Image (cartoon, rainbow, N blue to C red):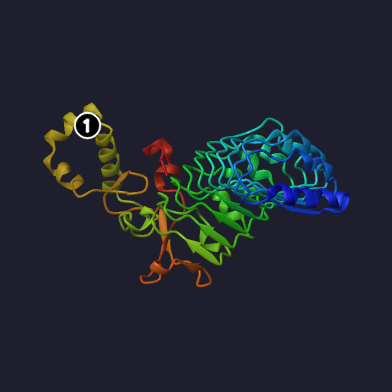
Amino acid sequence: MAERLLIRALKGGKNTKVVSLNGKNITKMPSALEKLPGLKTLYLQNNQISKMCPEISNLTKLTALNLGNNLLEEVPEEMKYLTSLKKLHLFRNKIHRFASGVCDGLQSLIQLNLNNNQLTWIPREIGRLKNLRCLSVNHNQLASIPRELCFLENLSELQLNYNQLVCIPKEIKFLKKLQQLLLARNNIKSLPEGLCDLFNLRILDVAGNVIQMFPTGFQDLKLREFYCEGNPLFLKQPVSAIKREDVWSLQEITSRFIMNQLAEKNPFLMKAIKWYPQVRSIISQGRKCAICGKFFLTTWLECVEFVPPSKNWKISRNLQLVPLQILICSYKCFYQRNPNLFGICQV
């Protein structure tokens, strides 16, 4: 069947624009494809192809190539000769690397689908795909993404669901055209402040991570859809605090110093405190900020604030049953603004 389809395509010669050989149990890419210089679309998904044939380099007018659900182990080097290629689908293969130089010739590429592979890294050369608009690398094993990816100025959709990411580069702020960012089911602990500069962002999915709070200005994003279920954000709230006071009592200042020094096991204070039961009684009433980990007695400058999401945001259905408030880092706490007195806050 595959042979008949290929023969029919070859008869068309230069006039053949589309070839579809999906699900034909092909183990090798047909080298006869080089005789179709006018070919624009090639479908080869659901086969058993493990390597590209060198002859494909002659298909310089090819704009769409689908090799999904095959046995490729790398993004092949031969791809760099497909200078007109705009859509490349390599989902459900066994890809764990990019061949050297493969990104050099794909300057026309708009869409790249690498879902369901075995990638643990993305090369810095990805930044050369200047026309890329949609990058999908769901269901891989990525632990990080290169900062060069954040300089793809035309990127509007970035999908990185179901990986092992722990952070997002601060350079993400340069993706000014980004409209959709999908980061579900990773190990991300926090989002960079630069995310709040993405004024064109409309869909954000961070469900199933380990995020506790969001950066300053997050509530001002013009999102249409926001998904955040499965984060520990709603399981632990910081100690409630009162607003800033211009003057603290001497007792507050002294108590903070003593409590934090004791927490650091200052030997002098640990020995001296035994002789002052009244002081021990006072500092026993102290509390600890859940965000920065420092101690206070009665007055605290809040590290965070709870902000309801915009009414225009579409949120997860199971979060609509309770009043949702997102935790925003509002301003740096006292310790961070006065490091010489109390040490550096780890917020």
Identity of the residue furthest to the top in this view: 267
The structure residue drawn at horizontal position 61% and vertical position 48%, both measured from the top left corner, is 68
Give the residue displayed 25% in from the left and 40% down from the top. 259
Q: Is residue 182 above or below residue 284?
A: below
Residue 179 vs 21, above or below: the answer is below
In percent of width and height, residue 147 lies at 61, 39
Q: Furthest-right residue in view?
A: 14
Q: Around disc 1, counting alpha carbons within 10 Å, would you say few (fewer than 14), some (14 to 19), or many (20 or more)?
A: few
Q: Nearer the viewer, residue 298 or 249?
A: 298
**Residue 31 in view in this figure:** yes
Q: Position of residue 24 (x, y in %)?
A: 63, 49
Q: Between residue 340 and residue 120, name the one nearer to us.
A: 120
Q: Residue 85: where, in percent of width, then height?
A: 76, 47
Q: Amino acid at mark 1?
A: Leu
Q: Which residue in the structure is indicated by mark 1?
A: 269
Q: Position of residue 177 (x, y in %)?
A: 68, 56
Q: Quadrant of residue 94?
A: top right
Q: Under tag 1, what secondary structure?
A: helix
Residue at the (41%, 41%) spot, across then down: 346
Q: Which image quarter holds the C terminus?
A: top left
